Amino acid sequence: MTGSQAGQKPANSLRLTLWILLIVYIFNFLDRQIVNILAEPIARDLNLKDWQIGVMTGIAFAAFYTFLGIPIARFADKPTTNRVGLISISLVVWSAMTALCGMAQNFVQLLLARIGVGVGEAGCTPAAHSLIADLAPPEKRASAISFYSLGIPIGGLLGMVMGGLVADAYGWRMAFLIAGIPGILMALVVWFVLRDPRMSATLETRQAAPTMATKDALAVIFKSRAFIYIAIAGAAAAFLGYGKGTWTTIFFQRTHDLTPGEVGFWFGIGGGIAGAIGTFGGGWLADRFGKTDRRHVLTAPAVGMVVAIPIAISAYWVEVWWIALLLILLPTVLNSLYIGPTYSCAQGLVPLRARAMAAAVLLFAQNLIGLGLGPLFFGILSDVVKPLAGPDSVRWVLYGAALLGLIPSLFFWLASKRLNDELDKQG
């Protein structure tokens, strides 16, 4: 093998890994988020209240996803664990449970199936982030994790468009079935194509590698002030993002009288493209401007979330649906800038043996608070203000959600001030 060929091998391995993991993450978010566009027809069919929609779309998934994420991450951090195998098995579980959502006959059955989706998905991202961080050099880590994170907007786009169109044509049950089955086939690709680089070592070497106890891993993670600020900022951003994501789709159906298919198509495509631009752009900006001054890894998220506020309020205020849709695209870009920088910082602020754990802690904060409580909180708030606001209750809630964007912006700014001292200083 020539020197140039040897130099190309790691890059090619990273590229292949990123593309396959991106597809896995697309399935991850498609199966997680499709319930949002299906929430209104499910609610009509099963006679659900707004708070039950919030439970179904949020806490039922998030509680098990987050609490199982910690022990699964500890398992992923063990030198003897095959992270590729873990991801593949997780993909089978959450895909099968997504299909089962389409067979639910009442609220309890649907709740149990959504819990199953959360159980399966708990094994994906901590292992994937750890795998990517092992393969990508620090100066390219934000871009690499941002590329993987494109699964969020792309999966959300496909879930909205496919879910809405299938629901209009064949009903919400068929949408769940079509979403779940392909993931089982993709699990075979992951199993047979990807390789965990640490599996190339002998079993004796891997068994002899030092491990870190859970309490020690948590201690070193929370020793970082920057990580704490990032976790708070990420949790607040996810709380607002998931809450607005669920109720914005319902807002377009209730206020602008669009069908699930229409909302899924227009909001799914527009929001998906905007989210992809913001997700990839955030990673690119972090790597581009964070080279000389590490503070700028988080500058774009801090500034973007403030700029997004007045534009989002305008989008919820206008009465013409297509103008509202166009206006909401820019805040979607700006509010997506944080994803890559946040997760890349989490990997760079902790030692190698705690990387999956760091991702799991961040996901715990973002999903329990964000996905778990965001849709539920806004659903309860909608019920509370409905006597005053009437059919505009969701609009009122979304006004408040837009203003709360100041909170994650503040904590991203506080975290950025610590990065020159803390980022990539661990062994």
Image (tube, rainbow, N blue to C red):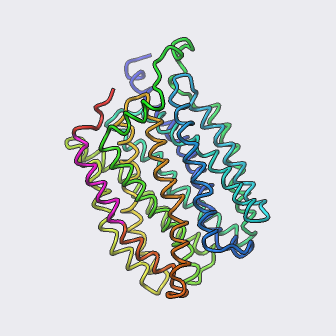
Residue appearing at x 47%, y 22% in the figure: 211
Please say if 126 is above or below 277: above
Q: Is residue 405 left or right of residue 114?
A: left
On screen, residue 329 above or below 111: below
The majority secondary structure of the magenta stretch comes to helix
Image position of 392 (left or right of 162): left
Image location of residue 399, percent across then percent down: 41, 77
Magenta-drawn segment: 405-420
Left or right relative to 381: residue 424:
left
Comparing 174 with 277, the one in front is: 174
Q: At 40% from the left edge and 34% from the top edge, which residue is drawn?
A: 136
Image coordinates for residue 138, horizontal then vertical, percent: 33, 35
Q: Quadrant of residue 207?
A: top right
Give the residue displayed 50% in from the left and 57% down from the top: 153
The answer to which image quadrant residue 69 occupies is top right
Left or right of 421: which side holds 345? right
Q: Residue furthest left?
A: 292
Observer-nearest of 338 and 21:
338
Residue 271, position in %: x, y?
48, 66
Above-or-below relation of 204 to 33: above
The residue lying at 46 percent from left, 87 percent from top is: 319
Give the number of callouts: 0
Which corner quadrant holds the C terminus? top left
